[in-house]
Image (spheres, rainbow, N blue to C red):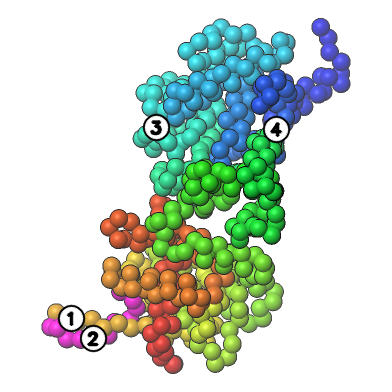
Amino acid sequence: MAISKENAQKLKYLFEDGHEVDWIGAFVKIVNKDTKTVPFILTEEQKQFVEGLEKFNIVLKSRQLGLSVCTVALAIRQCIVYPNSCCLLVSHDQKSCNAIFDKLKQQFNSLPSWLKPKEIANNRQEIKMANGSKITCCCAGNKDVGRGDTLHLVHLSEFAFWKMPEKQLNSITQALAPDGKLIIESTANGLNYFHDLYFQAKNNENSYKSFFFNWINGSTLFKKDYDNSVEIYKSKNNKLLDVAELSDEEKELVKLGASLEQLMWRRLKVASSGLDAFHQEYPSTDIEAYISSGANVFSNKKIDEVERAIKTNKIKYIPKENISDLPRLLQLHYGRSFFIWKIPKAGERYFIGVDSSEGVGQDYTVVEVFNKDGEQVAEFYNNKLKPYEMADIIDSVGHYYSKGIITVETASGGHSIIERLRYNLKYMNMTKYKSYDEFNKMQWRIGFDTNVKTKNLIINDFIEFFEKGLIKINSTRLLNEMKVFSIDDNGKMGASGSNHDDSVMSTALALAGLKNGFYYPF
């Protein structure tokens, strides 16, 4: 049957890449929570997900936001718009796999008859189509996952719960077509390979694009749950929750968009499962999903208070155009690697900590600057600059901040930085420590020798300064590192998983200089 010119133009539009949201809304139907079959109109979060996809994608999310259902619809579209496509939907267990296949069949069968390709197989959790396309649902751990196929769309569900995820991911990525898409998606499940991949993606340290979806913004999917929780809360407390009763954390959630109805639902969830479990399954931030209160070195409550103060007081680094005397070398990095909250005052003492790296794109070299009152006034971080380049930058920072005392950790690229600062650039105001040579003769060395004993000392001093309110932190980067700085069962302190602790260590070194009080004018 012929179609009108107008409808032909609409179909052309819908079948073009970039219009996936409209295609799904026009042709796919789903069963909603009221068991009614309705057009699949995506929520704002689902739209953001679909429209933002690149080749490699990793998604950390709250529970039950409907992203798996979106991916099923995308797989169906791929197989219709591009015949001879192969899509793979991998679940972490058989129960989840069965659920995904049921959703696939429901969505596929909801397509208009003129659009739906003829099926040549619909069994063993796989749909094969007469146009050469197929969609396969399977469990993680299946040895034949992706074997022999060129994959055009792959969805790996609840990846944080997989066994041997790295090995399986390597196998799947090798089968991905040049123009294919890979979606890794999961709720949090502790500090594991998924956690590492996600934060590496967030820090632009791998090829994945990171997405995070919190529980607050998915409110449209849980309206009935919230309504029921309001009734339960009212029956238990003889009244509804009032703004005046909110805790500091709940006030922050309101700023993120949470309603009082959602907070009543949250209170009931926390009462039944505990706050840590809620943070993991229904995080409001990606860091919160991984906070383990028992292992963290710094007080999460105190960190949250400081974060709120930064937001409330609108603390931001000084715009570049408002700084008139910034050295040329530092100007080149300002706003990207270098940030200033307070310009130096003549005659004031400054304390500069340096945690160094080799500048090969992995760990960062971080420079933290504090004034005599314990306020963080500047920060520099970069993981691409070599030690000799960083020495020149540290020299500029030191001179700019009134020839402040510099404490450089001797590990990694620290020795090179110290040598260049002292003997090439003649920077004299540097922390020294005592050591003994092979003849048991005492000598002074420049820098800070970090070992198990000294590291614990300076970190514990940092903790005391922070929790007693003796320092003022202005950097959210530093606060985020403090959230994941933990202590393991062997008493070893450091960043959890693949997170960084360079800012934490450089701050501890700056504070060690502040506590020691030594200053060498030159």
- Mark 2 and mark 4 in contact (Cβ < 8 Å)? no
- Amino acid on which the number 1 mark rests in the picture: Asp
Dot 1, crowdedness within 10 Å: few (<14), some or many (≥20)?
few
Disc with the residue nearer the chain's start (2 vs 3): 3
Residue under the image location 17 percent in, 86 percent down: 441
- Mark 1 and mark 2 in contact (Cβ < 8 Å)? yes
Is 477 left, or right, of 1 in this rendering? Answer: left
* Mark seen at residue 437: 1
Dot 3, crowdedness within 10 Å: few (<14), some or many (≥20)?
some
Question: Based on the displayed image, in which of its 4 quarters is residue 183 positioned?
Answer: top right
Relative image position of residue 86 (x, y in whole percent): 53, 21
Dot 1: element? loop
Report the Cα–Cα distance between label 4 and label 3. Answer: 31 Å
Q: Which one is closest to the eye, mark 4 or mark 2?
A: 4
Report the Cα–Cα distance between label 1 and label 4. Answer: 70 Å
Q: Which one is closest to the eye, mark 4 or mark 3?
A: 4
Report the Cα–Cα distance between label 4 and label 2. Answer: 69 Å
Dot 4, crowdedness within 10 Å: few (<14), some or many (≥20)?
some
The quarter of the picture where the C terminus appears is bottom left
- Amino acid on which the number 2 mark rests in the picture: Gln
Disc with the residue nearer the chain's start (1 vs 4): 4
The reply to whether residue 87 is in sight is no
Relative image position of residue 368 (x, y in whole percent): 49, 73
Q: Is residue 444 magenta?
A: yes
* Mark seen at residue 168: 3
Relative image position of residue 514 (x, y in whole percent): 43, 82
Residue 254 vs 437, above or below: the answer is: above
